[in-house]
């Protein structure tokens, strides 16, 4: 994990950028590394970046599922899950994004270890997911204001809930929808790519035990999004090299736009 921010005597709010929980979604790692490089490169050049690093610490996790990631290089390019051994079967791995402890085991998660959406034997069974959740929950860590979980593919910017298709009025639906709209606007302005936005369970399909539901439902981080990067299915997970940089550029523009919006919303700054 990389942490980027200007030192401060006061406690700072933070952003968390998460990538590569699903092993075959390589573009998510490229975007995380591009983001880290870009914000460092723009220090002293772009006043918005300076302000974003003064006010927030940025935590960038480029590969949350390293065992799965290595496996996609050595053995099976389309591997999705972790590489945990499962009891009573030769089927390997758990879907890291069905393993979080909020509405764990509900709709859209499988109890079959051979399934690609296997939720695991219990919530937070996977060391990667457990470590991340422990880190995010520690009260000594600063207050997370933004959580992004980068995936591919489908070109979507999704907010909670994931576990149900419909949101209810007491949810922070309007704030999340407005932020998602700004993000996809920044994307289309960069290279003309269209991303769809909306609540995850409605736009995609209900899926339980996902990161954004736990981060929103348990930690209370309103701005909690799953981003499905390029493409729309032509190449899918096997995104060609020439699409890597433009995907990074448009995602970076969106993340910066979201950051800037949070900055402007922040009282007393
Ligand atoms: Zn994914």
Image (tube, grey):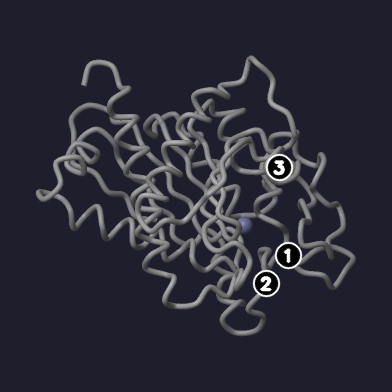
**Secondary structure state at the residue bearing disc 2:** loop
Locate residue 201, reporting x and y percent.
71, 39
Q: Nearer the viewer, mark 1 or mark 3?
A: 3
Q: Earlier in the sequence, mark 1 or mark 2?
A: 2
Residue 54: horizontal and vertical position, in percent? 20, 36
**Of the numbered discs in the image, which one, if any, rests on residue 79?**
2
Is residue 67 left or right of 115 when viewed as pictured?
A: left
Q: Image point 17% across, 42% down: which residue?
A: 50
> Which residue matches tag 3?
209
Above or below, 230 relative to 207: below
Q: Nearer the viewer, mark 1 or mark 2?
A: 2
Which comes sooner in the sequence, label 1 or label 3? 1
Q: Which residue is mark 1?
A: 93
Q: From the viewer's perspective, tell me whether residue 49 is left or right of residue 103.
A: left
Q: Relative to 73, is 153 above or below?
A: above
The crowding category of the residue bearing disc 3, from other C-alpha atoms within 10 Å (few below 14, some 14 to 19, many at least 20), is many
Ligand 1 image-quadrant field: bottom right
């Amino acid at each position: 994990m990389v942490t980027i921010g200007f030192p401060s005597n006061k406690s700072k709010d933070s952003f968390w950028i998460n990538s590569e929980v699903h092993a075959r979604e390589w573009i998510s790692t490229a975007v995380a590394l591009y983001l880290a490089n870009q914000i460092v490169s723009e220090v002293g050049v772009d006043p918005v970046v300076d302000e974003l690093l003064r006010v927030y610490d940025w935590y960038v996790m480029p590969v949350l599922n390293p065992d799965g990631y290595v496996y996609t290089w050595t053995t099976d390019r389309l591997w999705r899950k972790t590489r945990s051994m499962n009891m009573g079967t030769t089927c390997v791995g758990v879907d890291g994004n069905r393993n979080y402890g909020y509405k764990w085991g509900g709709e859209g998660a499988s109890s079959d270890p051979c399934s690609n959406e296997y939720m695991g034997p219990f919530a937070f069974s996977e060391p990667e997911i457990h470590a991340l959740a422990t880190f995010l929950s520690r009260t000594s860590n600063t207050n997370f204001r933004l959580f992004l979980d980068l995936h591919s593919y489908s070109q979507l910017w999704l907010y909670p809930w994931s576990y149900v298709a419909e949101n209810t009025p007491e949810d922070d639906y309007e704030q999340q929808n407005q932020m998602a709209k700004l993000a996809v606007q920044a994307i289309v302005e960069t290279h003309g790519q269209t991303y769809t936005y909306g609540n995850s369970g409605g736009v995609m399909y209900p899926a339980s035990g996902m990161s954004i539901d736990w981060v929103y439902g348990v930690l209370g981080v309103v701005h909690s999004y799953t981003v499905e990067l390029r493409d729309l299915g032509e190449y899918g997970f096997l995104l060609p090299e020439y699409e890597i940089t433009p995907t990074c550029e448009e995602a970076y523009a969106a993340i910066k736009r979201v950051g800037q919006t949070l900055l402007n919303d922040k009282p007393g700054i």
